[in-house]
Amino acid sequence: MSPKPPLEVTIETRSLGQDDAAVIRAKGEIDLATAERLATALASPASAKANALLLDLTKVRFIDSSGLRVVMVAMRDFPRLAVVFAEGSPVERLFELAQMLDRVPCFRSEEEAIAALMDGHP
């Protein structure tokens, strides 16, 4: 059995009524060696066609400044962005250290994030 890659990324499209959202889920570690995999997902055709982006980082067990950079680029490229992560997670700790919690639309569940995106927020 081969070891799991340090980062698994999946993309799907969800309907938000009249709009579509790209839902990108990351699982594993986001660092210098793997951040490009996440950036590639953000630049995918499915993401490019979507009106909003939901970035689910609840299963990320490590993230460094390379991952933070990818999220910051997503903030620039997707005016309707929602980021989901668990309370006390490495993602929350990094966002807190980087003073990003007030700048990034953060949610605790995909359901909360989808509801906000459907309401036209963030």
Image (cartoon, rainbow, N blue to C red):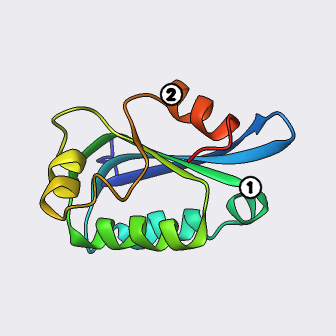
Q: Is residue 11 left or right of residue 62?
A: right
Residue 44 picture location, percent across and down: 66, 66
What residue is pinned by disc 1? 51
Q: Quadrant of residue 120?
A: top right
Q: Is residue 95 above or below residue 112?
A: below
N-terminal of the pair, mark 1 or mark 2, is 1
Q: Please state the total of marks drawn on the protein image.
A: 2
Which residue is found at the position 23% from the left and 56% from the top?
95
Residue 50 picture location, percent across and down: 75, 55
Q: Determine whether label 1 and label 2 are within 8 Å by CB.
A: no
What residue is pinned by disc 2? 112
Residue 104 picture location, percent across and down: 39, 55
Q: In whole angstroms, how far apart are the C-alphas of marks 1 and 2?
A: 17 Å
Q: Quadrant of residue 18?
A: top right
Near mark 2 (Cα within 10 A), the count class, few <14, some 14-19 or many ≥20, is some
User: What type is the residue that disc 1 sits on?
Assistant: Asn
29 or 82, nearer to the observer: 82
Q: Is residue 72 above or below residue 58?
A: below
10 or 57, nearer to the observer: 57
Which residue is found at the position 22% from the left and 46% from the top?
92
Which residue is found at the position 49% from the left and 66% from the top?
75
Query: Which type of secondary structure does the marked residue at label 1 adopt?
Result: loop
User: What type is the residue that disc 2 sits on?
Assistant: Glu
Residue 40 picture location, percent across and down: 54, 70
Query: Which type of secondary structure does the marked residue at label 2 adopt?
Result: helix
Near mark 1 (Cα within 10 A), the count class, few <14, some 14-19 or many ≥20, is some
